[in-house]
Image (cartoon, rainbow, N blue to C red):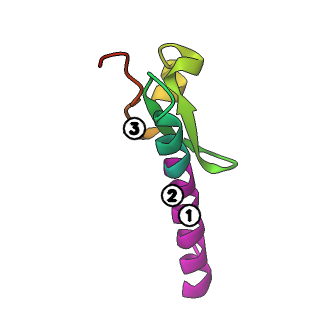
């Protein structure tokens, strides 16, 4: 439990900033990938972006940490 509301607010803003940064990275990568981009929780960084193409089908341990997905936007269809 946080000792003061100031500390609680700073923690929430930092957590939100980490999520937005991971989401921005996933969206940027999606334009250059055929694969889905995943936002996962991470103990050290808060959130990370992972490309499905890096892992093939995501292992169960990673799949359980998925918070958001961004579909790949690269396409061979014209």
Camera-near label (3 vs 1) is: 3
Q: Nearer the viewer, residue 42 or 55?
A: 55
* Image quadrant in which you'd find residue 14: bottom right
Q: Secondary structure at mark 3?
A: strand
Spatial separation of the CA atoms under disc 3 and disc 1: 18 Å
Farthest residue to the front: give it: 78
2 is within the stretch colored magenta = yes
Q: Which residue is mark 2?
A: 20
Neighbour class for label 1 at 10 Å: few (<14), some, many (≥20)?
some
Question: Going from the N terminus, do you reach mark 3 or mark 1 first?
Answer: 1
Q: Which residues are magenta?
A: 1-23
Q: Which residue is mark 1?
A: 17
Residue 65: in sight, yes or no?
Answer: no
Spatial separation of the CA atoms under disc 1 and disc 2: 5 Å
Do tag 1 and tag 2 residues touch (Cβ < 8 Å)?
Answer: yes
Q: Which residue is mark 3?
A: 70
């Amino acid at each position: 439990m946080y000792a003061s509301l100031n500390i609680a607010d700073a923690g929430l803003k930092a957590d939100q900033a980490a999520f937005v940064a991971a989401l921005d990275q996933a969206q940027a990568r999606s334009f250059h990938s055929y694969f889905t981009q995943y936002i996962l929780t991470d103990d050290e960084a808060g959130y990370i972006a992972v490309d499905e193409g890096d892992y093939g089908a995501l292992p169960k341990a990673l799949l359980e940490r998925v918070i958001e997905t961004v579909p790949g936007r690269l396409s061979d269809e014209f």
